[in-house]
Amino acid sequence: MNAIYTVIENGQEHFFSSKTAGGYSYPFLAYGSAKKMANALNESGFMGKVSASEMFPLMKADEHFPENVRGEKLFFPVPESVFCDRETEMSFNDFTPFKITLDFDERTIGFVFNQNCPDLPRSKINIFIGDKDAANFVDGIPCTIKDLESSYQIEVTAHILERPVFTIRIVSDTTCETGSALLPLDYRNQKELAKELETDDLDKCEIILIDAYGPEFKVPQLEKQPFSKLNKLAEELNRLRLDCGDNAFNSFVIANKIAPFRDADSALEAVESLRKNCALQETQGMNMRM
């Protein structure tokens, strides 16, 4: 399966794309193989000091992969901007089922599953690479999620990949450049957008068009809001949807119809009110069941 990888080592991030190393066990094989290759080269002293992250462009599919891809390169370095584009596309298509983070500093492996792929779980999983229990897996033995639950210190949290709330057109404050973005936009993608618009502050730029995902949500009053407030609203709406479900998001849309929000601040107040109502209903439901 397709996957995008972030490899973290010595505080540096390296970005890769893979056509075959998506899945549950392959990231563990990659983690272990890269570490073993780097250790072997460092022990020989032939190439000086090398890092595990440098091994990824050299790795090829072995017997643990389907026969039709054996011998092919597994990882292809990509610029951060390309990685960010692929990451954003996970919100609205199923081309990249997995986003995987291999952190050699913290010794963890993280998965984010694309919610647009119906056969994948909708969870974010962080797995600690222990000295003892993980040894067999990182030495090259394929594993399953069931194996992981008993063999790793595993943290599983409900996580639905953020769906876009707004799409915007934004004009630079320094050049004639115009850009577009799906909100919410994470920090890395914000940096890329600022670079594209040649600005040091996206709040200095003018948002000339905003469309909401969902035809019933009309928000012309938000077009003159600063980027940061609009992005914050998109983040909170996604969190509301994640914590309280789509019904809570629909209630937000209905509230805007009844009394249109004046600005992003009043919209954020409505989100907080809905969140409190959701928490209250959950508490009342627990009391009734008791």
Image (tube, rainbow, N blue to C red):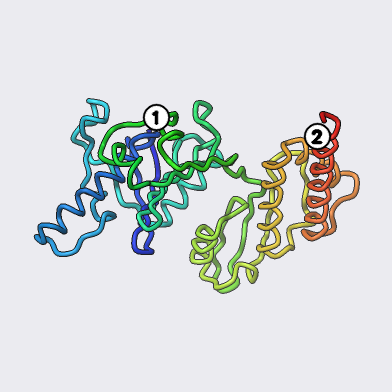
Residue to which mark 2 is pinned: 286
Q: Earlier in the sequence, mark 1 or mark 2?
A: 1
Query: Does 191 appear above or below 279?
Result: below
Helix, strand or loop at mark 2? helix
Q: Quadrant of the C terminus?
A: top right
Residue type at the position of mark 2: Met
Query: Does 289 appear above or below 166?
Result: above
Residue type at the position of mark 1: Thr
Q: Residue at x 29, y 37 (%)?
A: 136
Nearer to us in this view, 278 or 260 = 278
Q: Quadrant of the N terminus?
A: top left
Q: Which mark is residue 155?
A: none
Residue to which mark 1 is pinned: 144
Give the total of numbered labels: 2
How packed is label 1: few (under 14 Cα within 10 Å), some, or many (20 or more)? few
Q: Position of residue 112 (x, y in %)?
A: 49, 42
Q: Residue at x 22, y 25 (%)?
A: 67
Q: CA distance from mark 1 to mark 2?
A: 35 Å
How packed is label 2: few (under 14 Cα within 10 Å), some, or many (20 or more)? few
Helix, strand or loop at mark 1? loop
Nearer to us in this view, 133 or 56 = 133
Q: Position of residue 234 (x, y in %)?
A: 68, 52
Q: Position of residue 129 (x, y in %)?
A: 38, 46
- Judged left or right of residue 38, residue 238 is right
